[in-house]
Image (cartoon, rainbow, N blue to C red):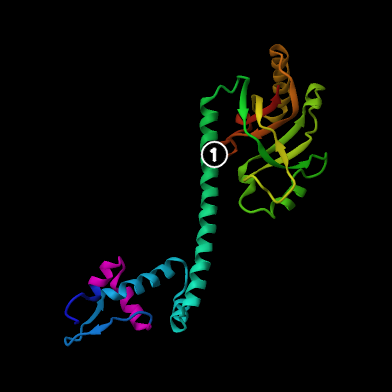
Amino acid sequence: MFTQNLFTVGQFARLHHINKRTLHYYDQIGLFSPAYKGDNHYRYYTYHQSPELEMILTFRDLGMSIEEILRYRSQSSPELLDHILSTKITDIDDTIRKLQEIRNLLTQRKDQLAYCRDCDLEAITIVDCPEELLLIDPCIPGESETLTMMEQVKELPGRIFGNGCGTMLSVRKILAHEFETDDYFFVRLPGSSPKVDCHRKPAGKYLRAFCIGEWDRIPDTYIRMEQYSLREGIQLKGYSYEEGMNEMVLRDMGEYITQISILCG
């Protein structure tokens, strides 16, 4: 019965896309050994051993050490295997979630760069924006804008600051030309049900403009937006939302792009 479906070390290694030295090592430490020793003293594996080896290789892919796998093999049971598999499935789900968050962030940054490259940065436009959830913190002169915010952010999962941050200024201050101090610092939150109190940036039409250069040029942009709204009969509401667009490729502050959006009606 041993004359069929037998594999040499080299054949079995190639079948499972591993080096035959790995099989020699597993045999040496008693982790996984050939099923049959022939009259020629050659050692052979059978195809029935393939699922067993694949499970060992999967454990290794999942980061389990040789010692952990040996320990499992010495006291294996359906219950222990179920526990290991459940734990690893949870770990994989967490990894997939984190990678998806990173992919979303990279996609956002790629789209943002393309937008800065292709749009007319001198134009004032009206755009449709979805609702967004923002974690906000009052801007207090002489104090760190982010200190309190960072205490809240560190309790949240993922790279929250990677989703975008900026400042908010009330329309009341804009129309009064009070540009010295912003009202809030914000961080955009992912998802729809955060575990913290948040500000909901309303969905709707926004007046959008860009400021190119140092931050001291931002008041001029607000005045241009105000003049545009008066000419077009547009009412500005709530807050403006200022956000840097090109920090990752910035070489000089003279090239800095600030996007400003104000809810309008």
Looking at the rendering, which quadrant does residue 1 occupy? bottom left
The majority secondary structure of the magenta stretch comes to helix
Magenta stretch in the rendered image: 11-30
Q: Would you say 5 lies left or right of 61 here?
A: left
The amino acid at mark 1 is Arg
162 vs 31, nearest the viewer: 31
222 vs 99, nearest the viewer: 99
Q: Name above or below for residue 226 compared with residue 247.
A: above
Report crowding for label 1: few under 14, some 14 to 19, many 20 or more residues within 10 A (C-alpha).
some
For the C terminus, the image quarter is top right
Q: Would you say 160 lies left or right of 44 here?
A: right
Q: Would you say 54 lies left or right of 10 here?
A: right
Q: Name above or below for residue 246 compared with residue 95.
A: above
183 vs 252, nearest the viewer: 183
Q: Residue at x 63, y 22 (%)?
A: 126
Q: Is residue 158 magenta?
A: no
Give coordinates of residue 253: x percent, y percent: 63, 32
Give coordinates of residue 30: x percent, y percent: 37, 83
Q: Residue at x 73, y 49 (%)?
A: 196
Give coordinates of residue 210: x percent, y percent: 63, 25
Number of marks: 1
Residue position for label 1: 109
Give coordinates of residue 234: x percent, y percent: 71, 17
Residue lying furthest front: 78
Q: Residue at x 66, y 34 (%)?
A: 243
